[in-house]
Image (spheres, helix red, strand yellow):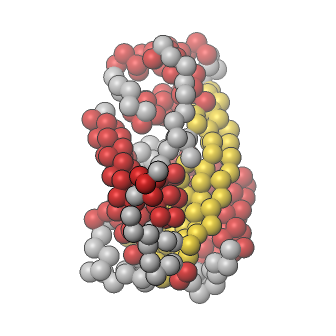
Amino acid sequence: MNDFFNASIWEKVWKDESDLKINRMKKNGIDPTRTFDQKAKTFNEHSFSEEGRKRTKRIMNWLEGQGVPFENASILDIGAASGVFSVPFVERGARVTAVETSPPLIELLEQNISKIAEGQVKIVPEPFEKIDVEAIGWSKAFDLVFVSMSPVIHNWESVEKVLQCARKFCYISMPIVPTEHSLVSEIWPLVTGQPFHSELSEMGYLQHLLYLKGYAYESLITREVKTREVSRETALQEAMTWLGHRRLPVDERNEKIITDYLMQAYPSGKVVIQEGGRFGKVLIRLQDQHMYTREV
């Protein structure tokens, strides 16, 4: 039972598990920070569709309901993508610093912010991991630090760096399980010979360590699913990327298996994909942080 309250053990397990996952992805030729490059346009279209805007509005309304103001607020949006949240933040009166490293997403972000108030969004095209928070004056510089579904959060050290930038609030969202993808579920038995099973993700480490370290926070767990139609070529690219995420070989054998399956299962050339799952959202109140942490 003592280990349950030992923060150092939880930190080590999270770091070890995350390092293993990242190393396996890199071994398979996948850069976690660049996985959205090929689907940037599709991601942007969905994010700013009617359905995407409704999802964004739900999250922002939840934040407002918890007492987070946007009018005249300074916001650091880490992993801003094409501005799915940066744009509506500005529309509600905030000033945004948007951190994004994917060239196609940055191009789309520039296009999207050109339609709103000039000078309200500053783009920082540098990996957050390489930014010296103290050196550039970001320590406690932002009313809200916003990190939505970003690979920046991968261990407790990364969480501490994000929290260092926040003056009042910090929002972090993560999947409860790796995002469910209908095509992956279809091809998994063909590639592995085994049925597909989801594994719990890192959200549990985040919440438990926040609890152990004395932070005040609200959390919300939701289930969200979206449906989209893509070409066989796009489906193949996505499936290969997902195999790498799930620690399977991204090789010629698996590429052929998937290609043959797509030809047979989707003769029209259009592949319908459902993706989503359970997602966790945490709003951390920096002003309410306890002045102590539990000693073990």
From the viewer's perspective, tell me whether residue 99 is left or right of residue 251. Answer: right
Residue sitting at x 68%, y 38%: 227
Q: Position of residue 128 (x, y in %)?
A: 35, 65
For the residue pair 19 and 293, the one nearer the viewer reads as: 293
How many tags in the picture?
A: 0
**In the image, residue 195 lies at what x, y percent?**
55, 19
Above or below, 68 relative to 99: below
- The answer to whether residue 59 is seen in the rendering is yes
Q: Position of residue 75 (x, y in %)?
A: 51, 77
Q: Is residue 259 visible?
A: no
Going 42% across and 36% down the picture, which residue do you hit?
A: 245
Q: Quadrant of the C terminus?
A: bottom left
Residue at 54%, 24% (x, y): give it: 196
Is residue 8 placed above or below 276 in the rendered structure?
Answer: below
- Taking 46 as reference, is 37 left or right? left
Q: Nearer the viewer, residue 189 or 254?
A: 189
